[in-house]
Every structure is written in structure tokens, then in C-alpha cells.
Amino acid sequence: MAEVVTPESVQAVQDNLNIVWTLVAGVLVFTMQAGFAMVEAGFTRAKNSANIMMKNLIDFAVGAPAFYIIGAAIMFGATKCGGWFGWGGMGMPSLSTGEGIWDWTFFFFQTIFAATAATIVSGAVAERIHFKSYLIYSLIVSAFIYPVSGHWMWGSLFGEASQGWLEALGFHDFAGSTVVHSVGGWVALAGAIMLGPRIGKYHKDGKPAPIPGHNLIIGTLGVFLLWIGWFGFNPGSYTAGIGSIGRVAMTTNLAACAGTVAALVTAWVIIGKPDLTMALNGSLAGLVAITAPCDLVTPNASLLIGLIAGVLVVLSVFFFDKIHVDDPVGAVSVHCVNGVWGTLAVGLFAAPEKYGYGNDLAGLFYGGGVKFLGIQLTGVAATCVWAFGTGLLLFYLLKKLGILRVDAKTEMKGLDITEHGQDAYASFQFFSNM
């Protein structure tokens, strides 16, 4: 006898599909931790590689429990003070304990995102930050800085009672150009400013001196891992096994490709060589920029967003070098600058409902006027004030405590030996201690 298909049974299948897809997407996003570690290690000097691996490991090992105990309650708890922060109790006691309940899947997915925001900063402060300071920073970002602004923009993902004030205005950031990447990027900028440049980064006349990364093969592999992870980051943000995930995967990929080509050409024109590191950062810039609008833009728009991102990242790298903000991997240019660009792109390119896209507010280029763009700009500005301001305060306090930056002798010798008593390349002493 054939089994009767009922609406309840269909919904049960869909619910379980949503859980499975969201878990798989979360695992894909977790691979980005490896990608970040490899990019940072490859773009910096060999003598700091073990330290970089440790930082990227500890981001997750410290950040995930911090987000579970405190951060999740702030980000997804019942909204307080007009949507400025939430609170749901330490450890989110409202979570159900039954097997297969959606809440566990949702918080697993969101924990990975919190760890990503913390990891972004690592590259900008590489090769000169005290490991103990990094531990403190990582804990505070995951437990407090990221969750507060996250509540403003994503709180209602756990229910209308958790809606933040920016959400209430109509702010849209589908997968985190601002919520994740700009927050990490603004804190990274604060850290790079407070730490100051690495020894030897600038000549006496103020011109930047190149400090090349020791392994561009590892760096390239890291970018590929990040690209793969983004197919969990963006399509996974539906947290549902539905047809739209394919469209978002497509817009994500097109923007990444366009960013790569645009950065390659821009760098080639400026420096006369097709620079690999610029092209790789162009890939990441395109991915960051498309993260906010990926669900609302057409494939053609995603190409344009990626092209602009690729140009911006190259110009931004040169700009920060010019003003003596030493960012060894270009984290600020990739995540902060292009997180801002991607968030504003929503207000420009969001396609209206008649094109099959689901937002009541159309972008400026579709006749939607400036209202939507103004809302997006409000979110960008609020996030800048919060993340950059708290980042400056945090790193300033660490500096006043005398634990922010290692001394010159330690920096010259390398953080692997001095901070950890280990050498990532113990039998291959073929590099200089620049």
C-alpha cells in the first residue's frame, strides 16, 4: 500500500532538508578558517608562520565558546532599548534540548560566522602583536563587539522579538558584507593603526618597502579554500534547502571572477606587472562585495559589483600603504572597504519583485530612489562608529597595559621561536630574518 503524502509529511521533509543543508553550509564556512590561515601565512614571512596558525586556531577555539555563552544571547536574545542590543540569558537557556530541533542547527551556523569576523583581524596585525593580546581581542570580539552590531542587523533571524533597529528601518545584508566582513575590517584597521607598521616597512623618506610573503603557493591555496567556503557562506545564509541557493551561488561566483580580473588588470596598469597577490585579493574582494546583495541582484549586476570591488581593493592597498597603515595581507582593503561597497551596492542594484526578487525596496538603478541607499548608508556608518570605535578602545587599552606589541628584538627574530618556542620550518632554514 502506497504511503499517503500529506502536507505535514512534506513539511517534515523540508524541515530536515533545511537542517542538513544548513549544517553542510556551516561546515563549508568552517573551511574558511583554513583558508584565512593559509592566506595569512603565505603572504607573510616564514618566521611567523606557526604564530599565524596558532592565532587562526585560537580564534575558533576561544571565539566559539564565547559566542555560545554570551555573544549569542546579545545577538539573538529579545531586543532591548529599542533594538540596540538583545539578551536571552547566558548560554541561551531558551534553546530546546530535543534532537533535530532547528535551534541547534541555527546556532551552529551562526557560531561559524562569529569566528569568521574575529579571524579577519589576524592578517592586519600579523608579525608584531603579542599572542596574549590576541587572545583577549578574540574573546571580546566574539562575545561582545560582533554580537552587538549583529543584533542591529540580524537579530530577527531568530524571531521577530529579537529585531534590531537597523532591521526595522529595512536594512539588508543577506550574508554579511557589513555584519561580518566590515565589522572585522573596521576592527582590523583599528588594530593596524594602534600597533603601527612592522620594522623595516617604510624607508626613511616615508616610501613603503616591500616585505614579500614567503609562500604564494600556500596563499593561493588559501584563497581557493575561501572561495569554496563562500559557497556555504552565501547560499547557506538562506538556511533552507530551496532553489534560490543555486542563483546565489551563481552571483557569488561571477562577482569573484570579475573581482579577480579587475584587480589583475588594475595592478598591471599601475605597477606594470600582473601581480598574483593583487589578483588573489581581487578574488576575495569580489566575494566580500557580493555577500550583502547576492540574493537581490541579477547575474549582470554581480559582475559589475565584482569588477568595481577588484579595482577598489588595489587602490585601497596603495592608499593605506601611502598613509603608513601597515596591513600585511590587505585585510582592511578586502573586508572593510569592500564590505562597505557591497552593502551600498544593495541600495543601487537590488532588483524589484517584478524581476523575481523579494525585496519591497528596489535599488536606485531600478527606480527605487535614494531611500534604500540611505538606509544602507546608515548601517555602514553605524557599524563604522561601533566597530572602529570599540576596536580603537580595545587596542588602546592593550597598548597602555604594555602587552599589545612585541619588542623589536622579538619581532626581528620572529614570533614562532620567541612566542611559541617552535619553528614552522624547523629543518628548512633558508629564509632571512628580515
Image (cartoon, helix red, strand yellow):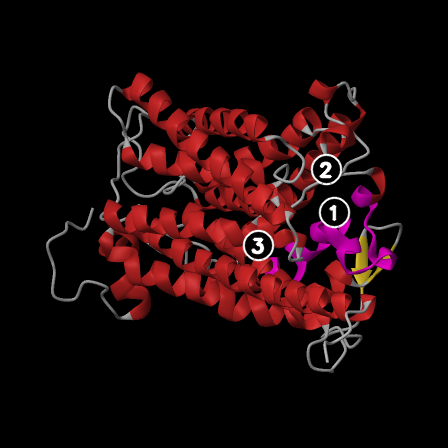
Query: Does residue 280 appear to the left or right of 344 in the view shown?
Result: left
Residue contact at pointers 1 and 2, CB within 8 angstroms: yes
**Which region shows up in magenta?**
141-167
Secondary element under disc 2, as helix, strand or loop, is helix
- Mark 2 sits on what residue? 379
Image quarter (top left, top right, bottom left or bottom right) of the N terminus: bottom right
Q: Nearer the viewer, residue 144 or 374?
A: 374
Residue positioned 64% across, 65% down in the render: 17
- Mark 3 sits on what residue? 397
State the separation of the CA atoms marked 1 and 3: 28 Å
Secondary element under disc 1, as helix, strand or loop, is helix
Amino acid on which disc 3 is placed: Leu
Instruction: Tell me if I can see residue 98 in this picture.
Output: yes
Residue contact at pointers 2 and 3, CB within 8 angstroms: no
> Toward which corner of the image does residue 198 lie, by quadrant?
top left
Above-or-below relation of 131 to 306: below
Q: Position of residue 67 (x, y in %)?
A: 64, 66
Amino acid on which disc 2 is placed: Gly
Query: Does residue 109 appear to the left or right of 150 in the view shown?
Result: left
Amino acid on which disc 1 is placed: Met
Is tag 1's residue or tag 2's residue first in the polypeptide sequence? 1
Secondary element under disc 3, as helix, strand or loop, is helix
Closer to viewer: mark 1 or mark 3:
1
Residue positioned 53% across, 55% down in the render: 116
